[in-house]
Image (cartoon, rainbow, N blue to C red):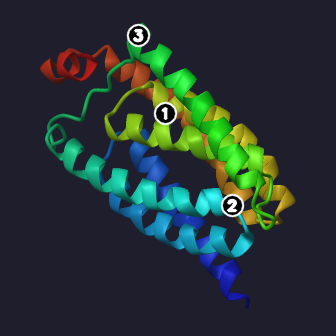
Amino acid sequence: MDTWFLLEWSAALLSLAAVACMAARRRAGFPLNILASFIYLLVFRHSGLLGDAALQLWFIAWLAYGWIYWKKYENKERLLIPGKLSVRQLLVVLPLWAALSLLLGFSLSQQPQAAFPWADAFCVAGSVIAQVLQSRAIIFNWWMWILIDLVYIPVYLQKELYATAGLYAFFLLLAVLALREWKRSEAETDPVAAYLKS
């Protein structure tokens, strides 16, 4: 059996387990996602999705940060309470996403081996920001992941990364469910909520 096929499926299954943990606000998702990101770095580089490959290094760094950050607020009696972006923060996040997409898209479009440079750039730029927000337990990260997943699924299908495309379809479903769960949990009374919203 093809090594890349096995690696892709391994990363897909690890990622699925990790996102399910994150949706349930469980810190166990972080080490699973770190391992999946390392494997995906290899798979994406092999497939010519250079932006996605580089993105995995960013993920690994922020996943390590999130693993430590969430530990301060998660224990057996209480899960971490998500926070919101203010209007001012949102007015920074959205233009930053657009600017990063344009810069990265131009850079990737100059690389002959880059596949789908503009879609790749949009998703990579959004993923950079969404991962930071997720590591800080900000609800808006799920809105971003929903949009990113909707773009990634057809890209992966075109590159014949079928396991990954299927995985991102599951991610899309999990992101919708996680958004609902995190919004519900935000209403819980907890002193950590005030800190995260500041």
Most extreme residue toward the bottom, as rendered? Answer: 1
Q: Position of residue 134 (x, y in %)?
A: 40, 38
Circle 1 SS class:
helix
Q: Is residue 118 at all visible to an observer of this figure?
A: yes
Q: Residue 88 — which label?
A: 3
- Residue type at tag 1: Ala
- Give the mark nearer the N terminus: 1 vs 2: 2
Q: Is residue 169 at all visible to an observer of this figure?
A: no
Q: Which residue is mark 2?
A: 164
Quarter of the image for residue 148 reads top right
In the displayed structure image, the side of residue 195 where residue 35 appears, left or right: right
Q: Is residue 175 above or below residue 49?
A: above
- Residue type at tag 3: Arg
In the displayed structure image, the side of residue 167 where residue 80 appears, left or right: left
Q: Is residue 147 above or below residue 188?
A: below
Q: Residue at x 40, y 34 (%)?
A: 133
In the displayed structure image, the side of residue 178 where residue 108 appears, left or right: right
Which mark is nearer the camera, 3 or 2?
A: 3
Q: Is residue 133 above or below residue 183?
A: below
Circle 2 SS class:
helix
Most extreme residue toward the right, as rendered? Answer: 158
Q: Position of residue 29 (x, y in %)?
A: 37, 54
Q: Residue at x 24, y 23 (%)?
A: 196
Label 1 crowd bin: few (<14), some (14–19), many (20+), radius 10 Å:
many
Q: Which residue is mark 1?
A: 178
- Give the mark nearer the N terminus: 3 vs 2: 3
- The answer to whether marks 1 and 3 mark residues whose Cβ atoms lie closer than 8 Å is no
- Residue type at tag 2: Thr
Which mark is nearer the camera, 1 or 3?
A: 3
